[in-house]
Amino acid sequence: MTKALEDIRILDMTHVQSGPTCTQLLAWFGADVIKVERPGIGDITRGQLRDIPDVDSLYFTMLNANKRSITLNTKTDKGRAIFTKLIETCDVMIENFAPGALDRMGFNWQRIQEINPRMIYASVKGFGPGPYENCKVYENVAQCTGGSASTTGFGDGPPVVTGAQIGDTGTGLNLALGIITALYHREKTGKGQRVECAMQDGVLNLCRVKLRDQQRLAHGPLKEYPQFPHGTFTDEVPRAGHASGGGQPGHVVKCAHSGPHPGEHGAHGANDYAYVIIQPQGWEPLMKIVGREDLIDDPEWATPEARLTKLDDCFALIEGWTITKDKFEVMEILNEHEIPCGPILSMKELAEEPSLRKTGTVVEVDHPERGKYLTVGNPIKLSDSPTDVERSPLLGEHTEEILRDVVGLSDQEIKDAREEGAI
């Protein structure tokens, strides 16, 4: 089958996570992604958090599938000439350097347009124009400056960052959409353009329901938040605990252990929990399941308004039942009654889940130095453009191949470039 982006060539100047997330997604859809790396060093994540000595880390391998690697030193004359040729022959150039890095290399946007007017130049930055635009940003900084940390955690504790990489990976996904949109625009105009995504913007975009709630505060307390019964609201959106952004009360409840108990008999596993939501139509079946039919029509419990001040008691009733079932039994039983719920799945459980292997959401890949390892697959499924996840490239693995086939150098020119230290 035809790959959706197989005629698109990407000049990948990215490193670490936000940029490589974007370019990996484009590579999964068939784009020829040429990852440009420093000779002898490469992407810094090749050596970060290594679990096997002198082998590319999982940090690198899980962000750079389906790409080709070329080593290039743009500080040399031949290196700059090769880089110029790559700009001429590629459709998209993507970078997530610190502000001004490419300008200092002599390849600002004006110069890139001169070399290739059809080039789409895409960048990830920490912040948009404003007081922080020249500041460096990492994942957790983006979460803190984009509104996520201030609204995550419990009211009696500090702000908390999430385990999901909403700053880096989230912004990489935004950038991919921007690039595809710019490519579509180029089909109509023949011209390339700049695509910029700021990590702060991306996190705030994912926190839109909290921006919604900030405005709702002007008209009274937020009744769906756990702070409401205690009257502890200020003029800022509080940390939500387990509250649902949709306004329906939800909470994490304990479940029975689904396997041999760790440690002493009766010990509770770290992830033996489920998340349960109480919708108005779900109150009656929930009370039947937990054996409290007397509360179905009790005016002190029967309506969402009546339950607002006693949600802790509501979930204590539910937990009295869930503690007798494992989290998968809880999900099965509650779903039979259309009660929203979900087991708290550990990374171990997700890694071993057969259905995720079948759909390609989790993929096992063979690496010449590492051996077999697991990686995430394409989360976007197209009916006529399936994704084949290939291993990440070794450092400079495709240098000569790219110099011959893309740049058009002869064997002697490649030899000269190597002697100069350009590759």
Image: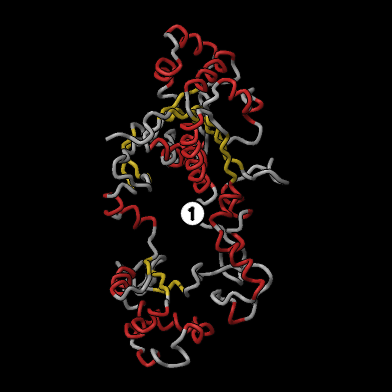
Coloration mode: secondary structure
Q: Is residue 31 left or right of residue 307?
A: left
Provide the residue designation for mark 1.
164
Q: Amino acid at mark 1?
A: Ala
The residue under the point 61% across, 50% down is 141
Task: State the image coordinates of residue 329 (x, y, percent, origin top left).
Answer: 29, 71
Q: Is residue 131 left or right of residue 305?
A: right
Counting every numbered tag in the picture gives 1
The residue under the point 37% across, 44% down is 378
Q: Which image quarter is the N terminus in? A: top left
Q: Nearer the viewer, residue 232 or 214?
A: 214
Residue at the far top: name it: 412
Task: State the image coordinates of residue 83 (x, y, percent, origin top left).
Answer: 53, 20
Task: State the image coordinates of residue 405 (x, y, percent, origin top left).
Answer: 40, 17
The residue under the point 47% across, 21% down is 89
* Quadrant in which residue 267 is drawn: bottom left
The residue under the point 29% across, 41% down is 384
Residue at the far right: name it: 131
Q: Nearer the viewer, residue 411 or 121?
A: 121
Q: Is residue 57 above or below residue 101?
A: below
Q: Is residue 43 above or below residue 228?
A: above
Q: Nearer the viewer, residue 225 or 297?
A: 297
Residue at the far front: name it: 188
Q: Nearer the viewer, residue 224 or 391?
A: 224
Q: Secondary structure at mark 1?
A: loop
Q: Is residue 75 left or right of residue 15?
A: right
Q: Residues within 10 Å of mark 1 (few under 14, many from 20)?
A: few
* Quadrant in which residue 144 is drawn: bottom right
Task: State the image coordinates of residue 51 (x, y, percent, origin top left).
Answer: 43, 42
